Amino acid sequence: MRRQTKRKLYAVFRFTMLGLWFLIVAFPMYWIIATSFKPAHEWFAWPPVYWSRTPTLENYRIVWTGQASSSTTRETASLQKPWIALGNSLVISLTATTLSVAFGTLLAYGVSRYRLLSEARMFNLLMFRMIPPIVVAIPLTLYYSTLHLLDTVVGLVIVYTITTLPYAVWMTKSFVDEVPREMEQAAEILGASRWRTVWEVIFPLVRSGVLATFLFILILTWSEYLMALILSKTDVVTLPIQLSKFEGTTEGRVYGRQAALAVGITFPLIIVGCLIRKHLVRGFSFGMVKR
Amino acid sequence: MARIELRHLRKTFGGSIEAVKGLNLVIEEGEFLVLVGPSGCGKTTTLRMIAGFEEPTSGEIWINGRMVNDVEPGQRNLGMVFQNLALFPHKTVAENIEFGLRMHKVERETRRRRVLEVAAMVKITHLLDKLPGQCSGGEAQRVALARTLVTEPSAFLLDEPLSNLDAKLRRETRAEIDRLHQTVAKTFIYVTHDQEEAMTLADRIVVMRDGRLEQVGTPLDIYNNPISVFVADFFGSPSMNLIPGSIASTRNGPCFQGPGLTLDLPPAWALMASASATLGLRPEHLTVQPTGGAFQAEVRLVEPLGKDTLLYFDHGGDKPLIAVVEGTRVFETGACLGLTFDPQRLYLFDAEGKRLR
């Protein structure tokens, strides 16, 4: 076979595989969006309805206003607190992510420049993250109940900050490592203090990386389920917990509403992602800083 | 201006690797001193200790009569140009230059004036609004110089600043640095592994080897009177012909016996008869003639460089003997030619590489 033909065949094969993979990944997302616009009788319809002929915003209206229309019945009103859940999720994940990235960046700087932790210790830090969360969650419940942190915003912020810190350190460290030491020394010999150097020289250079890390951790905390389920009960409900509550209502499974809420949960992340897309690309393809 | 003194300066890394082994050196005010040597000889470590980035394991550093071992780099009033320049990529050229002044809390108006002055001095006024990434290699070099100049340090430390430039630009920037030294009349300490840079720039050259001073002197002094095989080999391009052999006394006087080579030596050298020695002869001191001469050898390779031509002779040793002849003369490989030399320009080193004569 000629080389050119071979290359073309390979390209066709590659794109076919990528196309299949794309379908597998994208289908659930498509299905959630499609379901969120379906009227109730189409949720379980067979053959499945891929795109409703009578799309409706009813699901969104019910989910986000908490008012059932005349046609639907008795969804437990007390469970429907999407705005409160949204507020909780925003406060908890933004606070925890900010703290985690702030501490993580400073720690990463220390590790990168002062060898605060050996390579082995750094690895241990990541290992800490590999412990199944459930192992930590049960003992944590005991501590939390003693400290009155159960079912509080502060409680969840603390646990999210600590559990995401390893990621923050690992990710930002690789960015700090990329900044040549001489850059700092140049600032130092020109009379800049250590903090001034970090603020004026290091931080602007790793900003993209820090933003990428921020988004990554925001996604983790925004969608965290297990810890939120165990460490909070009724007072502090986050969006993922709220989403799960759509399952056991008296009416059975209300897929349409669940889908409408799921779209609402994912949407903010997509917006944030789009806003900082430029930084993300730079952050994940670091290495262009060096002259 | 600064007078810098190093006293018994030592630096070890990790307890076992001794990078600098007891250095004593005085750098006079306004002097252009070049630290030169192969990589790993301790020259950069020495410079970094002077700058304050490395702490000496023992010994003292004095700047203008003050011991600065415990003084932070920013408080030593030194300027440094780094090998990779270390310009701040997110700041414009003007902001880069202004940085040091801002750190010293200089007023905005004065800062602006100083930046313009310095930019004009190194001819980069047209670049002030650009980012370092938009400058060419030579331009970035000037920006780095300007950033160092603006704070008016008492001494300039330059760590292989030309290593990232191509040959032509390197020559130009070298001349620029020389001019700058004359203009600002400050102490310059310049680290390089390039003997040509050292020769052309230095008032005084310090040759370092394995963490020690091998030889200190003016460029010509070092070139004409190398104290060891190491220095003789390091300076000069092409480097000195070094022929291992021995000195024997014969009825006709002393002679040098090398591989496939016997050379008569001046009678005065008879006292130096020894089992092993190295004879040194600079390529430009070998005269090539069609026949006769002190000895004959076959041309193995002809390397025309334009102005000069290098001839590689096979004399039976491991390394060929190199001679420099005028570029206008034409030679062919395989020809057997006569070679002569001025005995006064011979160098002789003992078995340890120390200069005998």
Image (cartoon, rainbow, N blue to C red):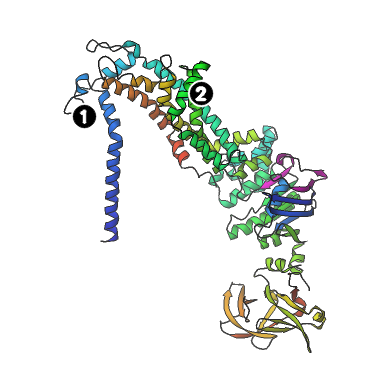
Residue, x 80% and y 52% (percent of image)?
B28
In this view of the protein, which residue sits in the foreground, B249 or B102? B249
- Does the image show residue B327? no
**Residue B268 found in image quarter:** bottom right
Disc 1 crowd, CA 10 A, few/some/many (<14, 14-19, 20+): few
User: Disc 1 designates what residue?
Assistant: A50
Label disc, if present, on residue A237 of the rendered structure: none
Does B96 sit above or below residue B244? above
Label disc, if present, on residue A158 of the rendered structure: 2
The magenta region covers B54-83
Q: Amino acid at mark 2?
A: Ile
Residue B147: give x, y in percent of width and height: 65, 43
Q: Amino acid at mark 1?
A: Tyr
How far apart are the two marked residues, 2 and 1, measured between alpha carbons? 42 Å
Q: Say which element carries label 2.
A: helix
Quadrant location of the N terminus of chain A? bottom left
**Residue A36 found in image quarter:** top left
Q: How many marks?
A: 2
Along the polypeptide, which appears first: circle 2 or circle 1? 1
Membership of B82 in magenta stretch: yes
Chain to which the residue tagged by mark 2 belongs = A
In this view of the protein, which residue sits in the foreground, B303 or B136? B303
Q: Taking B352 as reference, is B309 left or right? A: left
- Does the image show residue A231? yes
Chain to which the residue tagged by mark 1 belongs = A
Residue A124: give x, y in percent of width and height: 52, 38
Membership of B299 in magenta stretch: no
In this view of the protein, which residue sits in the foreground, B95 or B110? B95
